[in-house]
Every structure is written in C-alpha cells, then in structure tokens.
Image (cartoon, rainbow, N blue to C red):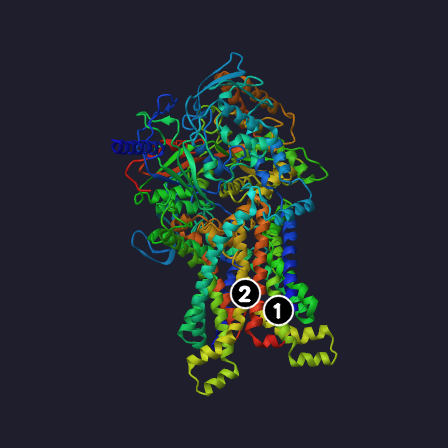
Amino acid sequence: MIRKNKRRFSAAALVLLLVPVAGAGFFAPYDPITQNRDTPLAPPTPIHFVDQHGRFHVRPFVCRWLADDPGGVGTREDCSQTSPIRLFVRNERPVEGQTLNPSLRLFGTDPQERIFLLGTDGYGRDQFSRLLYGGQISLGAGLLATGLSLGLGILAGCVAGYFGSWVDDTIMRAAEIFMALPWIYLLLAVRAFLPLNLDSRQAFLLLIGVIGVAGWARPSRLIRGVVLSGKQRGYVLAARGFGVSTASIMRRHILPQVSSVALTQVALLVPQYILAEVTFSFLGLGMGEPRPSWGNMLAGLQNYYILTAHWWMLASGLALLPIFLLFYSFADSLQRNFPDLDLAR
Amino acid sequence: MRRRGRRGCIWIWIWIISFWLALGSDAVPQAATGNEDVLAVAGDIGRRGGRLVASLHSDPKCLSPITAVDASSKEIIGLLFADLIHINPYTQHTEAALAKSWKASPDGKRYTMELRHGIRFSDGSPFDADDVVFSFKVYLDEKVHSPQRDLLEVAGKPIQVRKIGPYEVEFELPQPYAVAERMFDSVRILPRHLLEHVYEEGKISQVWRTTANPAEIAGLGPFRLKQYIPGQQLVLERNPFYWKVDPSGTRLPYLDEIAFLIVPTEDAEVIRFQAGDIDVISRIGADNYDALARDQRAGAYQLQDLGPGLEYNFLFFNLNEVDPQKLPDLRRKQEWFRRPEFREAVSAAIDRESIVRLVYHNRATPLWDQVTPGNKQWVNPAVPQPPQSLARATALLHAAGFTRRPDGVLVDPRGQAVEFSILTNPSNAQRTKVATIVQDDLSQLGMRVHIVPLEFQAVMTRIFDSYDYEAAVLGLVSGDADPNPEINVWTSGGATHLWALTEKKPTTDWQAEIDRLMRLQTATLDYRERKRAYDRVQELVAQFDPVICVASPHVLVAAKNTIGGFKPAVMGDYALWNADQLYWRLDRHP
Amino acid sequence: MIFAFTRRLAQSLFVVFGVSVLAFLLTDLAPGEYFEEMKLNPQISPKTVAALRAEHGLDRPVASRYALWVRSVARGEFGYSFAYNCPVWPLLRTRACNTLVLTITALFFSWIIAIPTGILAAVGVGRWLDQFSAVCTSFLLSTPDVLIGLVLLAFALHTRWFPTGGMRDAGHVETSLFAAGRDFARHLILPVMALTAGTIPLLFRHVRSATLDVLDSPFIVAARGHGISRTRILFRHVLPVAANPLISLFGVSMGTLLGGSLLIEVIMSWPGLGPLLLHAVLERDVHVVIAATVFSTLFLTIGNLLADVLLYMADPRIRED
C-alpha cells in the first residue's frame, strides 16, 4: 500500500517537475542567451511587499539592480525604482531553435526591468530561464541515451540468455570488452570529426547517441540474468516442448518478465546519463555556448570560490538532486526489493 | 715520552678530521674563497635558513635541459642550472651570469666571453671553458634533436663556439644579429665530467629523466635536486657552491630547501595556499584572486597585481589556401575573411571593455595589437585604440558590400547569410568566455556565429594539419620581451604564422611590409631603429588585423607576508625568478 | 569444473588481448598527437618536431606500432611514455599502488559499514532504521562525486582538522616511520570518506535486498516456527545464503579498484592513477593510456573470475550443476 502510494507520488512529482522544463517557453521569464552585461553574477532578485517608504503593497514588486560602479563587477539594489511582478506578460522576442514559442510568458515585470529568480551568471544571463531551457537538453539527453542503451541491452541480453552456450559466451565477452575500453577516445574522435557547421544541439545529441549505444553492456548482463532464470520456468519449458517458435516464446513469455526489470533500469539509468552529460560538459564535449544545459551551467563552477561567493550558480546542481531522488524512489517502488543492479552471473 | 706523543697525535687527527667534516658540511656558511669569481648581487640582506613550499601543476617530465620542453620541467631546470648571459625578468635586460664579461667584434659576428674563474658545479667539480664548449656541442648536434638547437640558429644556420683559453670562449654567428646576447639566456651549461661519456655512447637524450639519482645531476644553479616523489613533491636543496653572494658577502641562496608540491588544479592550489601548506603561488586566475582578496584580513599573505604580462589573446580567421574540392564551404567564407574591411568591422564590433570586465574581473588590459603594455621596451602607445563602435562596424561592412536583410541577418554581396564558427578549447575557460562575448557582439551585426568547443589536440590538428576551421580564439605568450622570438609568427613562411601557414610568400602588400620590417630589426643593431621598425609592425597588425587582439590578462601572484626579497616580475618565472635571494623574515621551522 | 575454469581463463586472456588491440585503434582514431602541442611554440622548428616523432615511431603505420608495443610488453616496459621520457611500467606501478591503497581502504570501510546496516535494515524492514537509511542512501546516491569531494575539501579548509589534499606533507620524508605513517593516515581520511560515501549506498541496497530475499524463504519461516533464536537464525542460516550475491558483488567491485576513484583523486590531488590517466588522455600520451586500460581490464576480468570461483566454492547448488 505504502509502496503503491510511493510509486504514484514519485511519478506525479516527476511529471510536475518536468512540465516547466518542457514548457520553458512559457514558464521562463526570459530567453537563455540574452546577456545583461551590467549585472553579471547578480544574486537572486529579492521580492518585496513593503517599499522603502514603509507602505505595504498587495502585489509584490522588485527593485532595480545596477552595477556597483561603472567599471566594476559588483551589483547593488536601487529601491528608488520599482516595478511590480506581472503575470502573463507578452513575449519580448522568440527564442530560436524552440518548437513552441508561445506569445505569453507566465510571469515577468516591466519591459525594461528584470527579475532574476535565481540570479545571473557571469555574462548577466538569467539563471532561472537557463535552468528551464537547459533542463530540456539534459533530461532529453538522459532519456535518449537510456532508450538506446536499454534497447540494445535488451536485445543482446535476450539473445545471450535464451540461446546460451557459445552465443552467450561471445556476447558476454564482448560486453566485458565494451565496459573496459576508454570510450572517451571515441567521443573525442567523434566530436573532433563532426563538420563545423553542425548545429551545436545536433552535435551534442549525436554524442549522446554514441554514449547510449556504447552503454549497452551493463543492462544486457542484467537482462541476461533474468532471461536465464526465466528460461527455466515450467511454462517456458512446456512451450518449447510444444514446439512454439522462438520468437513467440520471447515475445509472450520472456519479455514480460524482462519488462519489469527494464522499467526499473530506466529509472536508474536516466540519472546516470544525466550525470554523464554533466561530466562531458566538464570536459568540454557538452552543449556548446551559448545554449544552456545543466552540465555546462555546472562546468563553470569548477572554481570552488564561485561556490562560496555566488551560491546561486549551484542552481542546476541542486536541481539534479530532487530529480535523482524522485527517479530512484520511483525505481524502488517498482520493486519488491531494491533491484540487483549488477551481478556477475 | 712516546705515550704523550701518541696522545698528541690523536688530537691532531681529531682536529684535522673535524675540520675536514666542517668544510664539507652545508651548515657552515661558505665564505667565498679568494680565487673564486663570484657575482655580488644587489638587494636585501637576508637570513639563511628555512624551506619554501611552492607548487607545480604537473609533474616535471624530465630534468635535462637538452630535451625539456614543458613548463614544469623548465621551471625546475631554471633553478638547477645556469646560463652564460641571463635576462633579468624584472628589468627585462641582459646581465652577466656565468660569463663575467663579453665583447662583440666590430662586425657583430664574433662574441668573446670571459667566464668566471674558480667556480664549481653542485657536486664540487670545477667549471671551465670545456664545459661550455661541450654544452653547445650537445645542443647543436643534429642527431640529438634538442629543441634548443632552433634557438641557436641565426638566419637558419647554427652558431659556432670555440675555446680560446681555459676561461675564455668565442662564438661566431653566421651574420650580425641584433640581440645575440639574449640568445644565450636559458642555454644551460652542462657538466662535461658527468655527461661526456654518455654523449659518446649516443644516449645523451635519455639522460636525467625524473627517475634519475640526484647524485648524478650537477649544475651551476642555486639549488640541486634532493628528492623527487612522482605525483607528490619535488625537493631541492641549497647548492653549497653557488657563485653569487649578497652585498655583505654571504653566499646565496638563503633558503635551505625549496619544495614543490604537485597540485593538478588551480583550485586545489589556492585551497592549500589558504590552509598554509603552500607559501607562494606564481599565477592565479582573476576569480581566485578576488576570493583570496576577500579573505586577506584573516590570512597572513600578500597579493600583487603586476599588470599585463606578455600574453595576448586573439581571434583570427583562417586565411590559408585550401583545396576547393575538399573544403568548398570554407573557401566560400574566406572571401569574406580576406577582406580587410570585414576583419576591421569584426574588430570594431568587439566590446573589449566588457571582456576585460566580465571575463577577467577587470584584471586584464584590452589590446589592439600584439604587444602589451607589460613590455615597456617595445610597446607602441601610438597605435589607435578605438572603443567598441557598432556604427563604424556597420559602415565598414556596408562599404564592403554586405547588407542586412529585413529579418536582421547580415548577407554578403551574393546574398548568402554570414554564418561561421569559432573554435575554442574549453580547458581554457577564459578564452571560451571571450568567444561567447564575441559571439554576442557579432550577433548585433547580424552575423550568426557558432562556438565549437574542441579538445586542445583536435584544435591543434585543425590549425596545423588539416586547416579545416573558420575562426579560432587562441593565446600566445611571448618568450621574451624582445620581438625576435616572435619572428616565426609574423613573417610569412614562419612555422607559427597560424592564420596563414600556407602563405610561404607574402600575398598582400602589408604582409610584405611586415616581413621586411621584421627582417630589418633582426639585423640592425641600433635599438632606436629597431623600435621604429617594430612600431610600424604593430601599426600594421592593428590596421589590417591578421589577428584581432583582444586582451592581455594581468599577472597575479600571492605569497606569504613573511617572505623577504619577494619581487615578482611579469616575465619568465613570475614569483621564483629570484629564488636565490628569497628568505624568511621571521624564524620559521621547516 | 576445471575445464570450465580453464575455458573462462582462456576467454579472459582473449578479452585482455582484444582490449589492447581495440584501445590501440581507438587512440589512433582521436586526432592529435603528443608532439602536436609543440607546434604552437614559436621557438621550436617543425624539423625538430618531425625528428621527435620519428624517434618515437609515431610516423609508422598502426600495425608496426602495435608490434613494437607488444615487444616492449614482453620486455616488461609496457611501452614508452612520451611525456615522462621513460618506460611506462615503473610509472604505472607507483601510481597504481597509491590508487589501490586508497580504494582497498575505502572498500574495506564500505563493507564494514554496509553489511551490518543492511542486515539490520532488512530485519527491521519498514521501521525507522530502514526508512532513515533508505533516505540517506538515496541522498548519497543522487549526489555527484564531484560535489561530495568539493564539500569535503571546503570542510577541511574551514576546520583545519584535515589536510587539504595530497598524500604527504611537504618535507616530512626524513622523520620516523611512525610519524610518516601517521601523516599518511591523516591524508588518507578525506579521500576515503569521499569514496566510501559514493560506494556505501549501492552496497547497502544489495545487502538489504539479499537479506530480505532470504528472510522470506520458507526454511527461515520454519526455523522461526521451531523457536530458534533470532541471532542464531541470522548468523547460522541467513548470512550464508545471503552471501551468495554478495560474493559475486565483491568480485565485481574488485574490477572497480583501479578506475572508480579518478574524480576523487583529481579533486583531492591524490597521486594515483586518475590524474596520470587524465593528463595522458589530454596530452595523447598513448602508451600510458593503453597500459592503464589493459591493467584495468585485467583487474576487471580477474574480479569476475574471482567472483565465479568464490561463488562456485561457496554455493553448493552451483556445484551440483
């Protein structure tokens, strides 16, 4: 009972978190690439209800942010200029490369003012908008890579587990080789050989595709284990005895057993591949500037001191935590026990 | 009678042996003996003793001056060995080192140097002209393939060396060379007594790897190798035979030891500096500098912003001749790149002030040509430095036949949208940021720019081998304040003429003029004439933009307050160039 | 039995060989070479670069280079590092030892903590210990290694209780063995904590899952029905059976001994295989990369083999097969 509730809860929470990401065109107040060079590294804009004269306003408002001194890098608040927070503002300019470009945005302020819910980065770009738009890339990458590696893994695992003997041996040794190789070289090579005029988004997705394909080894071993034990079940032996074709047996008896494991694997692999995207951005193989992704937003944080001075830059890293937690708890709820993730047999 | 004599004998022996031991020990300051040709250096008079802890970003790859090319190795080698004539990084002028005096022949082709008498290597063996001749023989030997050989060539031919006396050598140059003196800097003198037989066996290029026994290495530098633990630390100890003394006659160096910790990332380095493990950092990035400045009240360290060094970061377009079959797109775009108005418009559109402010936190100087204000001898202040002007850029593009469509996209005279890519290397975060700002600036002109982050090796391959790139952001650090080491960059046919490696002969008038001026300043001996020529080169670079220079980051160093004699320079080894004169002001236990 | 074991051994050797060939090909695929970087230096001529390349055999075809490498392996050198100008093996050996000290200590502590916690959580399933550990491990599992490492470093900096990186303090090499050992242990604490924090969650889950599986089985229910005490059931009946998947897991975690700590080593400046490999990859010091890959594969296959052997010895059911 608790488990069922947990499953529903985590699934619902995931969907809830994913909606603003998918609909970034509506939920984000600004586009992710406009630079506001006067206000780099500005902290989250405080929302006020009481203005500097002490009057209370029902509608919350924000003050203007200025550069500390014209040549400097600090910023400060100037409450002599205020602007209210409005809902359903008109879209200032459409973001290129987006399929949906609604004419309205959920919230914003006056056209010349800015509200930075999560502060700005080193170029003055709104972190909150970048978080939402960037989530599209990172989550999309995670799902794509998971789909590819799981699909291939299921294929390889089923074949290996069902047919056994030398087929099994070959596939498992190949899996070991795949797990051992330094794939970083292949990725560097692929990235380096791509034509220069490829859109950075396409280049990145191609890379993610390569990772997904190369990652078939781990899920395949798991699936193989399930198929091996499933093969011994009474009804499968009976079906074989009856002369049912291999394909039919696979489809009707083996695959359903695999599917529950596969679903759990999805919930576990997606966070891993999102993390892989973060790692690639550290190495510079990720999404190119100026498009955001959670990975390249975090990559700018390699400097520990930015963390202490401008903690809001951690936004994308902190966004990862609840998403991972939800994925893992969803995975847990699907299983009677926690799954056996990686066993030799 | 006999017994008393024996007792007396024993005491004499004890006295002799202890005297001999005292002579051999380092603890006793070695006063310079009368027949040693020491060099008295000006500066503070410091206290002997203590250990300094510095850091390296990677392991030194080898300790042999013959084959070392990477920065870490060169830093250590600089402390272990000495050269004949040394360029003082602080004053940027040459000064006498192992050669105590020299004179040039009237035709400028022969340099006779008198070496210091009576000085010894770190293992005690004497130094003389044979060591100098041997060292140059090794460096110039073609079969050894030492990178040093390229530095000892004038107009493509190597210099020659001849021994005249036990402490006198003569160098002959194939043609007069304006800065022949500066050529000898960093050409380290090797110990003939240790290496001659290795050279004769043909194994000289494998000598002195990092696994070498410290006893096998001997040099004339202020320190000698004590111990190396790979991946962790390298410890140097005082060279008791070092040939420099301070104004009071005490033999240098003051420090007993220098330890280099190997810390791979700058962040870890700064953290350890704050924790007190490291005493001096030679180069910090701007954000770490700000972070340290914030905490400076708590710590007991000093930070120094030395202004621009010799590094210049720039954007350049691919102007190589490429095969139209293989790279048709590039060929088409090069029609834009080759127009000087196009490049000038790009240069005018770049907001250098924002770059300095946002990328370098105001710790950089904007540049319009390749010589930074840190190079006081050679900078040309008369080069125009126009601020960002989109209006001027648009006017220039208009004059070149580019127009803007109603949707804002810039098109060339044929009607094709102006779109190109800029290569960057993400391991240098600052250059990537420069590219991002440039991209945004150019989008205001209607150009669509992609940033392509490629790993460093891939960038190198595209620039040097396949020429398959459109534009790139790179940076170079001049090896010396003098323009001569840069000749390969600016003359056509030079090996590092990055934007046009296929241009073996000048294809434009201004490039021909640059070639002529660079060759002129190599041969002329008069500084004023050379300065005029190089000033003109800078003006041409700023006007015709073979590279569009953007900014030069400042040199930022940090050190503990109690280090005496700390005088960082913008050239060479910023913090430790005068390691032999550094000392601890208060009493400090290692 | 013996035949199956020999067959596995042969296959594993084949895997190692296959990996070496593929790694060679793969490193050839990525553009760039070690000496490429020198071209950017205006003071080194192309002639010198070409000569250096020829000296190290980089201008030869792949097959010839592979043959040279195999010969060097036979000599015990495992290739030649362009960067360090020395054979790869001594370089690799020291760094690998440093890494192994770290990972073995971390593995030891992870197991020591995970086993009792997992068992207790399984025994008291659904109660506060179980929920609490589930939350903790989920949290740890979701936090990237990078963040854990950085947080620990920040902690070390602010409290000054721990050294902020490295393996030893500067210049403490002359002191006594005891002091050196203590210094070494101090430096070991933080990286081990970071690594353990990364491996405990998974281990805990496996232990818990294995124990839960066993606790459900009929013979345990029967034992409890017989009135046998809980402790005796736990140690005498549950553990041996639950150990089955854990043994295979132990074998597999041997495979991660060399590779799993790369990020932590880089962040904490631990002089292990991680930083060496990273620099080698970025600089294209290919022989170091290939040797490190082959060694990791060796560990991986030995780990799998060990897991199979241990399983065979521990589980009578498999022996029956």
Residue that badge 2 annotates: C251
Q: CA distance from mark 2 to mark 1?
A: 20 Å
Residue B455 spot, x, y in % from top left: 57, 45
In x, y percent, where is residue B188? Answer: 49, 29
Q: Secondary structure at mark 2?
A: helix
Q: Are marks 2 and 1 on the same chain?
A: no
- Furthest-bottom residue in view? C226
Task: Specify the amino acid type for callout 1.
Answer: Ile
- Mark 2, Cα crowd under 10 Å, few <14 / some 14-19 / many 20+, is many
Q: Is residue B191 above or below residue A188?
A: above
User: Quick check: can you spot residue A151?
Assistant: no
Residue furthest toward the top? B106
The image quarter containing residue B420 is top right
Instruction: Specify the subunit that label 1 lies on.
Output: A
Tell me which amino acid carries mark 2: Gly
Which residue does the numbered mark 1 point to in the structure image?
Answer: A223
Quadrant where the N terminus of chain B sits is: top left
Residue A195 screen position, x and y as percent: 65, 45
Answer left or right for C184 relative to A261. left
